[in-house]
Image (tube, grey):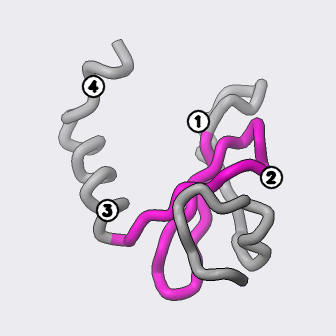
Amino acid sequence: MDQLRNGMAAALLGEARWRKSRFSNPSGNCVEVAGLPGGAVAVRNSRDPEGPALIYTRAEVDAFVRGVKDGEFDDLID
């Protein structure tokens, strides 16, 4: 695998085990996530599984999840 970088083709993350939320809608419009070797987390669009993936550190994902749980982004879904 090449060095991890934002925007790399998700197909290049061959070891990734992608998963999506059980709350995703039936048409599949959601994001998928995968833990990567070394602790990074990849995110891709489920409608474009071969397309680009965004790569985040565990600390970045942790900060985002904590923000979601704390309601910091609730205004985005109203």
Residue 71 place in picture, x, y as percent: 21, 34
**Cα–Cα gap, marks 4 and 2:** 30 Å
Type of the residue with mark 1:
Phe
Q: Which mark is residue 23?
A: 1
Residue 39 place in picture, x, y as percent: 46, 81
Residue 28 place in picture, x, y as percent: 74, 32
**Quadrant position of the C terminus in the picture:** top left
Q: Which mark is residue 50?
A: 2
Name the residue nearer the viewer: 25 or 47: 47
Q: Residue at x 79, y 74 (%)?
A: 14
Sequence-first tag of 4 and 2: 2
Type of the residue with mark 3:
Glu
**Cα–Cα gap, marks 2 and 1:** 22 Å
Of discs 3 and 1, which sits in the foreground?
3
Q: Is disc 2 surrounded by few (<14), some (14 to 19) or many (20+) residues within 10 Å?
A: some
Of discs 4 and 2, which sits in the foreground?
2
Name the residue nearer the viewer: 21 or 31: 31
For the image, the number of numbered tags is: 4
Sequence-first tag of 2 and 3: 2
Sequence-first tag of 1 and 4: 1
Under circle 1, the secondary element is: loop
Of discs 2 and 3, which sits in the foreground?
2
Which picture quadrant has residue 53?
A: bottom right
Type of the residue with mark 4:
Asp
**Cα–Cα gap, marks 1 and 4:** 16 Å
Q: Which mark is residue 64?
A: none
**Quick check: 66 above or below 12?**
above
Residue 1 place in picture, x, y as percent: 72, 83
Residue on which disc 4 sits: 74
CB within 8 Å, label 3 to label 4: no
Q: Which residues lie in the magenta part? A: 31-58
Residue on which disc 3 sits: 60
